Image (tube, rainbow, N blue to C red):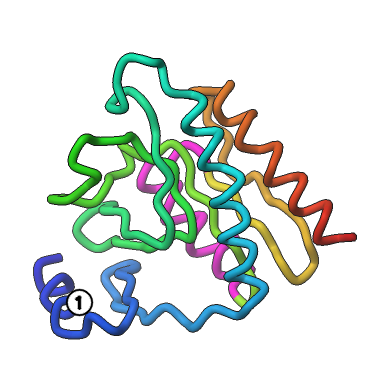
Amino acid sequence: MAEFHRLCDQLPERRLELIDGEVLEVIAKGSRHTAVVHRLARALTPLLANHQDGESLLCGHELRIEAPLDLGEHQEPEPDLAVVTARSDAWLEAHPTAADTLLVIEVADASLAYDLDTKLRLYQQAGIANYWVVDVREPMAFFLLQGKSDTSLLTALREPVEALVAELRG
């Protein structure tokens, strides 16, 4: 992992993931993919703010966009969206782990098969409880891993995902 982080530091202009111990360069995103990620981020962020318990941000969740997750020595993916436990330092000194992650959402354009196979296996083995994939080519949402934790928040987050998919089907 340290070697991977050194490589990332040496190549800051490139987006890299560590999947099964292999360094992969994240492919350039198309306009449809980018638009869907940003539209989902705009829709989900207020829902997370509304689910704060009123006492402390530390008890809530935050949305991370195209940011790494530390899933072990050989795994550091950068999912399109991840809902993670909020921290007062905004993850300044570490990346969230599977234990910190409530939900991962991948937006698939050319990557649907990879997201439904390799990424599903990766997130499942890491213990991610909830994993969703939004296909932007044939607009559809796949709710692949459905954990039981924080169901009211997950139900609230699922609604704008389903609405966006319906809108894309137009």
The image shows residue 149 at horizontal and vertical percentages of 48, 24
Q: Is residue 113 visible?
A: no
**Who's the residue at 43% across and 36% down the image?**
102
**Who's the residue at 82% across and 55% down the image?**
167
The residue that mark 1 highlights is 8
**Who's the residue at 77% across and 45% down the image?**
163
Residue 54 counted in the magenta span? no
Instruction: Name the secondary structure under disc 1.
Output: helix
Residue 118 counted in the magenta span? yes
Image quarter (top left, top right, bottom left or bottom right) of the N terminus: bottom left
Magenta range is: 111-130
**Who's the residue at 49% across and 83% down the image?**
28
Task: Determine the main secondary structure of the stretch shown in magenta.
Answer: helix
Q: Is residue 20 above or below residue 156?
A: below
Image quarter (top left, top right, bottom left or bottom right) of the C terminus: bottom right
Q: Is residue 52 above or below residue 109?
A: above
Q: How crowded is mark 1: few (under 14 residues within 10 Å), some or many (20 or more)?
A: some
Q: Which amino acid does label 1 sit on?
A: Cys
The image shows residue 44 at horizontal and vertical percentages of 56, 42
The image shows residue 31 at horizontal and vertical percentages of 63, 78
Q: In this view, does 169 lie above or below 123?
A: below
Q: Which of 22 and 109 is in front in this view?
A: 109
